[in-house]
Amino acid sequence: MYDVITFGSAVMDVFVDTDTAEKGKYMGYKVGSKILIKDLEFDIGGGGTNTAVAFSRLGMKTGYIGKIGDDESGRKILDLLKKEKIKFLGKIKQGAISGYSLILDSKEDNRTILTYKGINNELGFDEIKLRKIKTKWIYYSSLLGKSLNTQKKLATILTQKGVKFAFNPSDYLIKRINLKPFLKLCEVLILNKEEAKMLTKNKDLLIGLHKLGPKIVVVTDKNKLISCYDSHNKKKYYLKPNKIKVVERTGAGDAFASGFVAGLIRNKSIMQSLKLGLRESEGVIKHFGAKNNLLRMRLK
């Protein structure tokens, strides 16, 4: 029996720092120009593997569901999972290309991400060995296509068996898909403020999101107040992030979400879980890479 199984993307992250300044809400590259790269780094990323590593490093028996190619990136993903003591419960596709993300960092420490999902979105339900999916919690990050349909079917089956479902959808998924069938199954929904506004027009984002189905809702807002509503005791919670120097934000959302859910898995209070999520995310944004500074401790 797993404590948690994550189901989401696995990609090779390529961090590109050109020292380009932001202009308003945009980061511009002049057409026809040749821009020097100040720094270039590679790391394994993707919401599925980022969160799996976070859970495993907190001492939880963790599985990961996803689809990867048999290319060099796929082999590195498998090596990472093995190293981090995470059981691969997905599928390897011969001749397929694994996912890539190109992360363009700005001078102001923000970033724009170009993602190529590759084989990530092609996992069919018949490629999962359902008898091996025995877990207390299932955690989803965003996928599309065949994999999204597999996620929907699997969540329905598992929640009927009493498995708790945590969901952290991205803005592109919210824009493309009707998420109501997922939200009705959710124990926990975690979003940033922009994503939350896409799902509800209610001025009270927490209550508006709760009405869609999730029992516990968390909304983050970068370095501003984190808010949470727990319908089990009909109470709201707030937590203010610390003032820290940001090196790179990639993976911060995954780190926060996995830390918060890990707290709940270990029966911590909502506030203790929020603080653990914040500790994870603030550790990540102090360094390059979505996994490099995740906590290593046995959460009890």
Image (tube, rainbow, N blue to C red):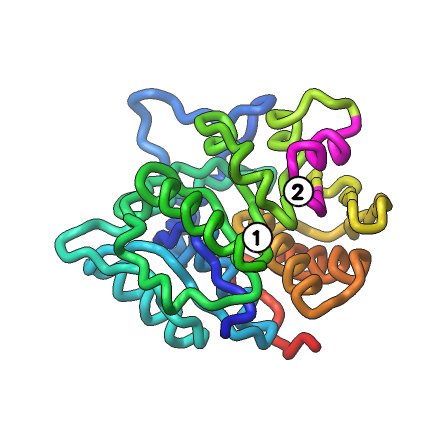
Q: Which mark is residue 165?
A: 1
- The residue positioned 49% from the left and 56% from the top of the image is 158
Determine the residue located farthest toward the front in the rendered image.
160
Q: Which mark is residue 82?
A: none
> Quick one: label 1, few (<14), some, or many (20+) residues within 10 Å?
many
CA separation, marks 1 and 2? 9 Å
Mark positioned earlier in the residue sequence (1 or 2): 1
Establish if 33 lies above or below 276: above
Determine which quarter of the picture holds residue 191.
top right
Of 196 and 221, which appears nearest the observer? 196
Residue 186 image point, x, y percent: 60, 46
Residue 190 image point, x, y percent: 64, 44
Determine which quarter of the picture holds residue 211.
top right
Residue type for callout 2? Pro
- The residue positioned 64% from the left and 79% from the top of the image is 298
* Residue 159 within the segment the image draws in magenta: no
Highlighted range, magenta: 204-218
* Residue 217 within the segment the image draws in magenta: yes
- The residue positioned 30% from the left and 54% from the top of the image is 67
Disc 1 on helix, strand or loop? Answer: strand
Q: Which residue is mark 2?
A: 214
Establish if 152 lies above or below 70: above
Residue 208 image point, x, y percent: 72, 29
Q: Residue 66: in sight, yes or no?
A: yes
Of 222 and 135, which appears nearest the observer? 135
Establish if 294 lies above or below 125: below
Q: How many marks?
A: 2
- On screen, residue 205 versus residue 64, left or right, reads right
Residue 30 image point, x, y percent: 38, 22
Q: Residue 292: in sight, yes or no?
A: no
Disc 2 on helix, strand or loop? Answer: loop
